[in-house]
Image (spheres, rainbow, N blue to C red):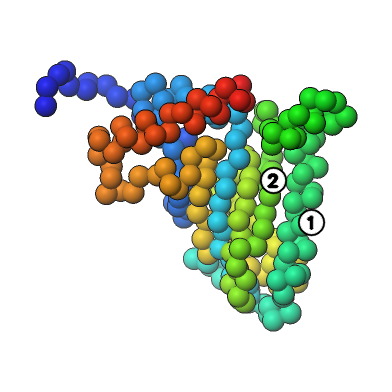
């Protein structure tokens, strides 16, 4: 190896994942730290797959927490679950419009809606922009959740609240982030590829879509 040694290499973390979650975790290296900040200011949607289990509740909403109660769940159907999800999405769409500070009667609002760019451009509570049921096999179910400004614990609590709405209880069995803004699981490097060559290649492969998103949004 020739050339000067790296004496200082700044690495920054994007949207965090807590210890019980998995999936896409974006890091910035060198100049990438500035890009991380710019992407953060774009308020891009993140997507998760979230697993749930009906019939019990715990103190931290996860399946590994201390058991609080057990409930029946035989009355729950996929149709009932999807009705609850539709209500959640409708309520959050109203919040999205409110925090976007856009007059929905204007041409600007129409153009942003067509491009899918209506989003809060400042701080807001967690907002669910889309949610759907991927799998349903009692007592288990899996959701796909598109959201902004969330935490993984917020998503676990959402599973708990869905259980309550269905006159039962539910715990979260998995939170996996499959997309963070422009980055998807296909862009992610498994641990076996944490080496200089793979990291450089990953940066090159993502460069164009990062630049495109920043030009479109900022």
Q: Which residue is mark 2?
A: 129
Residue closest to the far right: 105
Lateral position of residue 173 relative to residue 8, left or right: right
Lateral position of residue 24 relative to residue 90, left or right: left
Residue at point 83% right, 25% down? 107
Q: Is disc 1 in contact with disc 2, using a CB cutoff of under 8 Å?
A: no
Residue at point 63% right, 68% down? 170
Q: Quadrant of residue 133?
A: bottom right
Q: In front here: 157 or 207?
A: 207
In the image, residue 132 above or below residue 110? below
Lateral position of residue 192 relative to residue 111, left or right: left
Q: Quadrant of residue 162?
A: bottom right
Residue at point 69% right, 40% down? 125
Residue closest to the far left: 1
User: Residue 150 at what x, y percent from top left?
Assistant: 61, 44
Q: Quadrant of residue 216?
A: top right
Measured in 3D between alpha carbons, the distance from the residue under mark 1 to the one under mark 2, in whole angstroms, is: 12 Å
Q: Secondary structure at mark 1?
A: helix
Residue at point 76% right, 57% down? 86
User: Residue 3 at what x, y percent from top left?
Assistant: 14, 19
Q: Secondary structure at mark 2?
A: strand
Mark 2 crowd level (few <14, some 14–19, many ≥20, 10 Å Cα): many
Quarter occupied by the C terminus: top right
In the image, residue 82 above or below residue 72? above
Q: Which residue is mark 1?
A: 87
């Amino acid at each position: 190896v020739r050339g000067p040694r790296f004496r200082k290499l700044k690495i920054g973390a994007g949207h965090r994942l807590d210890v019980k979650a998995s999936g896409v975790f974006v890091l910035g290296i060198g100049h990438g730290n500035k890009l991380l900040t710019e992407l953060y200011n774009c308020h891009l949607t993140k997507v998760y797959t979230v697993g749930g289990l009906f019939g019990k509740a715990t103190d931290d909403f996860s399946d590994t927490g201390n058991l609080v109660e057990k409930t029946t769940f035989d009355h729950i159907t996929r149709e009932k679950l999807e009705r609850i999800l539709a209500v959640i999405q409708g309520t959050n769409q109203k919040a999205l419009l409110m925090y976007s500070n856009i007059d929905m009667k204007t041409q600007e609002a129409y153009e942003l809606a067509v491009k899918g760019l209506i989003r809060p451009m400042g701080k807001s509570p967690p907002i669910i922009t889309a949610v759907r049921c991927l799998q349903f096999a009692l007592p288990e179910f899996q959701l796909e959740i598109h959201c902004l400004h969330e935490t993984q614990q917020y998503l676990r609590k959402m599973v708990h609240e869905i259980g309550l709405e269905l006159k039962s209880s539910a715990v979260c069995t998995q939170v996996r982030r499959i997309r963070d803004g422009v980055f998807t699981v296909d862009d992610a490097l498994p641990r076996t590829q944490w080496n200089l060559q793979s990291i450089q290649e990953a940066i090159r492969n993502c460069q164009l879509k990062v630049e495109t998103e920043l030009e479109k949004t900022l």
